[in-house]
Amino acid sequence: MKRKRGFLGLVFKFFLVILLILSFFAMLGQKNAITGLEYKISAIEKKKMQLIKEGKHLMAAKARLASIENIRKASVNPEEFQFPDRKKVVYVKTIKQSEPRSASYQSANKSSTK
């Protein structure tokens, strides 16, 4: 009877050692996977910063190309481009939102009701 218990104990210990070894390699694999993801995130962040920088350069180039002086230099007749006179500028008022329509009757001539 002691032999059976000893054999079962030996098998149990063997499986525990195998389980310990497998868990160690699983943790190493997870650590390597996380490290790889960190490198990918770092590369993506660098690319993001590079694209933001490039976007800022493009916005500056757009502003430079759209400047009045640059348009005057490129035009055939530079006297055509003038800043508007403040007295001749017309401001258009925009409607924020349309109001709901009323379904009630409103008389057109209020003075005749007196």
Image: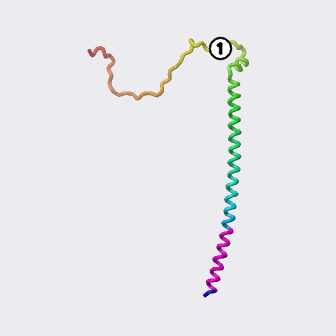
Magenta segment, principal secondary structure? helix
The residue at the point 69 percent across, 38 percent down is 51
Amino acid type, residue under disc 1 in the picture: Gln
Find residue 50 and report its horizontal and vertical position in percent: 71, 39
Residue 69 against residue 16 in the figure, above or below: above
104 lies above or below 25: above
In this picture, residue 108 sits left or right of residue 46? left
Between 83 and 4, the one nearer to me in the picture: 4
Residue 101, image x, y percentages: 39, 28
Q: Residues within 10 Å of mark 1 (few under 14, many from 20)?
A: few
Magenta-drawn segment: 3-21
Instruction: Please determine whether, in this image, residue 19 is positioned above or below residue 48.
Output: below
Q: Secondary structure at mark 1?
A: loop
Q: In the rendered view of the protein, which quadrant contains the N terminus?
A: bottom right
Above or below residue 104? Residue 25 is: below
Residue at far bottom of view: 1
Position of 91 with respect to 40 (left or right) is: left
Q: Nearer the viewer, residue 51 or 27?
A: 27
Q: Which residue is mark 1?
A: 82
Residue for point 65% across, 76% down: 13
Q: Residue at x 52, y 19 (%)?
A: 92
Looking at the rendering, which quadrant does residue 99 occupy? top left
The residue sitting at the left extreme is: 114
